[in-house]
Image (spheres, rainbow, N blue to C red):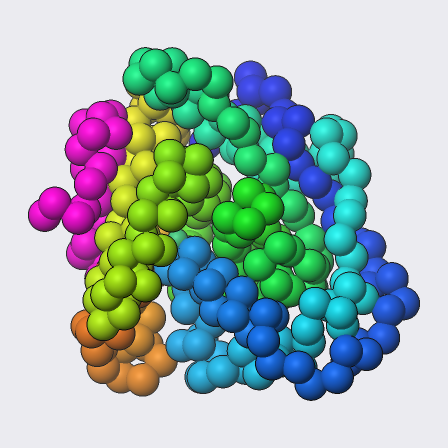
Amino acid sequence: MRLDDWKQSRNIEDRRGSSRGGGSFGGGGRKIGLGTVVIALAAWYFLGVNPLTILGGGDILSSVTGGSATSSSGYSTSGTTGQEMTDAEGVFISKVLKTTETVWERIYAQNGWGQYPQPKLVLYTGATRSACGVGQAQMGPFYCPADEKIYIDLSFFRDTGRRLGVNGDFAQGYVIAHEVGHHVQQRLGLLDQYQRAKQANPRQANQISVVSELQADCFAGLWAYELVKAGNVIESGDIEEAMEAAEAVGDDRIQKSQQGYAVPDSFTHGSSAQRVAWFTRGMKSGNIHQCDPSRS
Ligand SMILES: [Zn+2]
């Protein structure tokens, strides 16, 4: 990706390097409740990476079960917003976020939806608090609809993501564009619709989740479409990187690597083939109205 000509976004909230702030973890006792529920909800929005499969079952959930809204207050909750990043990784993320803002401003304008409401993107290290519970590095990037922020610990791109097959700058861009896609779903009222549908049809919750995730992939494809059209951003190999990343985070691929086989009914994000197909659909059509996986 060539981003030299791009300015940085004003929407990065940098919480890296801030410590837990001295609060004692567990001060609220072992309450099960809000924290557990919200973290489970947040899990719907994770990019392809299901923490349960990565960690072999429940590590994230159990570690968060001990923490309630009270105890999680020990985590950093604030950082500086709107400043220019100076480190290479920060600059990259900030510029990629800027590309998504430009693309979605255009799509909003084309559709007469008014001003695109830009999300904030929180960079953190280790763990941080979100309105959806405590974000932890192992979870991978996620979007929290309750505070409308994207959370990324950059170690994901260095460790887990790389192990899975998310390699290269455009692949990382796809990951961010996917999370931005969830924000667009949120602002268009789609996440609410999916949530209501899950409550009405609990047995189909996984399928509904897959629809939501594939749509976010298609939205990421719309981002790629605009950058291809711009002509001076995409470098050779970029599109392949994104395709490989979409394939790498398919549920079947992750399950097979974790347990040796895939269980389609348990998919929450879609198979590798589906994820590649929907990203491609967005990228080829450039048309948001093509991004409705519930109709196919
Ligand atoms: Zn997602």
Q: Quadrant of residue 9?
A: top right
Residue 106 visible to an observer of this rendering: no
Residue 42 placement (x, y as % from top left): 49, 61
Vertical comparison of 231 with 96: above or below: above
Q: Is residue 27 above or below residue 216?
A: below
Residue at 22%, 37% in the rendered image: 291
Quadrant (top left/top right/bottom left/bottom right) for the N terminus: top left
Is 235 on the left or on the right of 38, as rendered?
left
Q: Which residues are magenta?
A: 271-296
Is any part of residue 278 visible from this angle? yes
Residue 120 percent coordinates (x, y): 61, 37
Asked if residue 147 lies left or right of residue 191, the reply is: right
Q: Position of residue 230 (x, y in %)?
A: 37, 16
Check the image and name the residue furthest to the front.
Answer: 200
Furthest residue in direction right, as rendered:
22
Choose between 239 and 131: the one closer to the eye. 131
- Coordinates of residue 173 in the picture (x, y in percent): 45, 40
Q: Quadrant of residue 242?
A: top left
The image shows residue 274, relative to residue 260, as above or below, that is above
Residue sitting at x 36%, y 30%? 223
Number of numbered discs present? 0
Kindly identify the residue that appears in the image at 38 percent across and 19 percent down.
Answer: 113
- Which one is in front, 77 or 252? 77
For this view, does 252 lie left or right of residue 10? left
Residue at the left extreme of this rendering:
296
The answer to which quarter of the image holds residue 17 is bottom right
Q: Main secondary structure of the magenta part?
A: helix
Task: Check residue 294 for magenta coloring.
Answer: yes
Q: Residue at x 59, y 70 (%)?
A: 34
